Amino acid sequence: MKQTRTALLLSGLLLALAAGCGGDGSSGGGGPTAPQPMVLFTPDSAPTSASISMRSGAGTTSTLLALEILATDVADVRTVDFTLDYPGNLLQFTTFRQGTFLGSDASVILTNASSGSFTALITSAGALGAAGSGVIVTFELQTLAAGNGRIDFVDPEAGDSSGLEIEDVDFLGGTVQVVR
């Protein structure tokens, strides 16, 4: 009886050790697993009143960043113009989707596209500027390699319905992490 109890305790101890090592008791070399592919965008800060910022939007997958350009609590915005700098060694621009904030008939013009940068001019077709909050445009960026980098607005400008620059709009960037 004492031998049986000792054998049961020893068997239980061996099973516990095998489970604690990530194994199931079989001989299958259960080493560490590779990280799952993902793309993660982290804004520099939460959008503030009268700001244009970035966020990871609908359509983001483990290999595609759908980067939304978002207006928050702005007034009389008719144009938004900026150069978008992103890590060209990690991401590649593929396409864009027009947002609804400046109207469904707004125009989006992209120029000077290169690896890691392009210039965007988004203009409302209406005579009046938009007010409130909403998505201006979404840029789709395909992942190329693993790493971390910044995504920034360079020389950003928002214009009103009179064609004047709006001085009190903050433009907020962020960082991207790609795991492959």
Image (tube, rainbow, N blue to C red):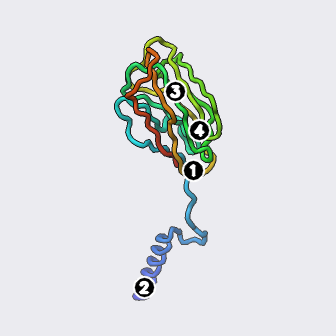
Between the residue at mark 4 and the residue at mark 1, the CA separation in whole angstroms equals 15 Å
Residue 113, above or below 87:
above
Front one among 171 and 92: 171
- Decide: few, some or many residues near mark 4? Use Cα within 10 Å; few <14, some 14-19, many ≥20: many
Q: Quadrant of residue 42?
A: top left
Q: Which amino acid type is shown beneath numbered disc 3? A: Asp
The percent position of residue 162, horizontal first and vertical second, equals: 44, 14
Reading the chain from its start, which is encountered first: label 4 or label 2?
2
Is disc 3 placed on a helix, strand or loop? strand
Reading the chain from its start, which is encountered first: label 4 or label 1?
1
Is disc 4 placed on a helix, strand or loop? strand
Residue 141, above or below 124:
below
Q: Which residue is mark 4?
A: 141
Q: Which residue is mark 3?
A: 81
Reading the chain from its start, which is encountered first: label 1 or label 2?
2
The percent position of residue 63, horizontal first and vertical second, equals: 59, 44
Is disc 2 placed on a helix, strand or loop? helix
Residue 130, above or below 27:
above
Q: Which residue is mark 1?
A: 37
Between the residue at mark 4 and the residue at mark 2, the CA separation in whole angstroms equals 61 Å
- Decide: few, some or many residues near mark 3? Use Cα within 10 Å; few <14, some 14-19, many ≥20: many
Front one among 161 and 57: 161
Front one among 178 and 172: 172
